[in-house]
Image: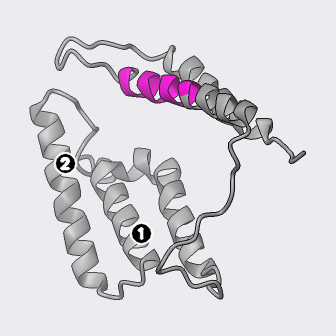
Amino acid sequence: MTERPYWLAAGTAGWGAIVLWKAHELPQFDQYAHIGPGLMPTAVGAGLVLLGLILALQIRRGVPFEEQGAEDVNDNHVVSHKALTLAAAACALPLLTMKPLGFVVTCTGCFVLVAAAFKSRRWGLNLALGAVVSLVTWWLFGKLGVQLGGLLPALGV
């Protein structure tokens, strides 16, 4: 008899339960857009719990979990630790810079780091594209009535 990875289903449902628990602390509905900041995390958490239950049912039925082959996968591929570090830095950047530098500078930095993780070496273009996307996003959210903070908080703007 093969091993049945119930831990995978439990982990998926457990992660969903944690997301649901934390999403419950956020308002589900808002006065401006009628969709609050807690609605999407609640939907994601509920989806993860549902997927965990479906996965547990598949494991109980004996559905095998095997690696699937793909046409364009190189078996000798090595992990690029540099790319992984750059992507992780892009994920961590908002924790350190959102309050002091603001949304636009933080998102621009994230864009540049992710582009570098994908081996783009066009630093000027990446910086310009990241700044444009971040500025437009910041402006559009402002038009919707959702304030993402000042343009450049460090400069008092």
Q: Measured along the vertical axis of the image, is residue 129 above or below residue 103?
A: below
Q: Which residue is mark 2?
A: 137
Residue 150 in percent (x, y) is at 25, 42
* Residue drawn where x is 36% and y is 14% of the image: 28
- Does residue 28 belong to the magenta stretch? no
Q: Measured along the vertical axis of the image, is residue 76 above or below residue 18?
A: below
Residue bounds of the magenta highlight: 39-50
Q: Quadrant of the N terminus?
A: top right
Residue 22 in percent (x, y) is at 56, 22
The Cα atoms of the two marked residues, 2 and 1, are separated by 18 Å
Q: Quadrant of residue 34?
A: top left
* Residue drawn where x is 45% and y is 53% of the image: 97
Q: Nearer the viewer, mark 2 or mark 1?
A: 1
Q: Measured along the vertical axis of the image, is residue 47 above or below residue 116?
A: above
Between 41 and 11, the residue placed more toward the observer is 11
Q: Amino acid at mark 2?
A: Thr
Q: Amino acid at mark 1?
A: Val
Comes first in the chain, label 2 or label 1: 1
Between 1 and 102, the residue placed more toward the observer is 1
Which numbered marker is on residue 114?
A: 1
Main SS class of the magenta portion in the image: helix
Residue 28 is left or right of residue 157, and the answer is right
Determine if residue 96 is in view: yes
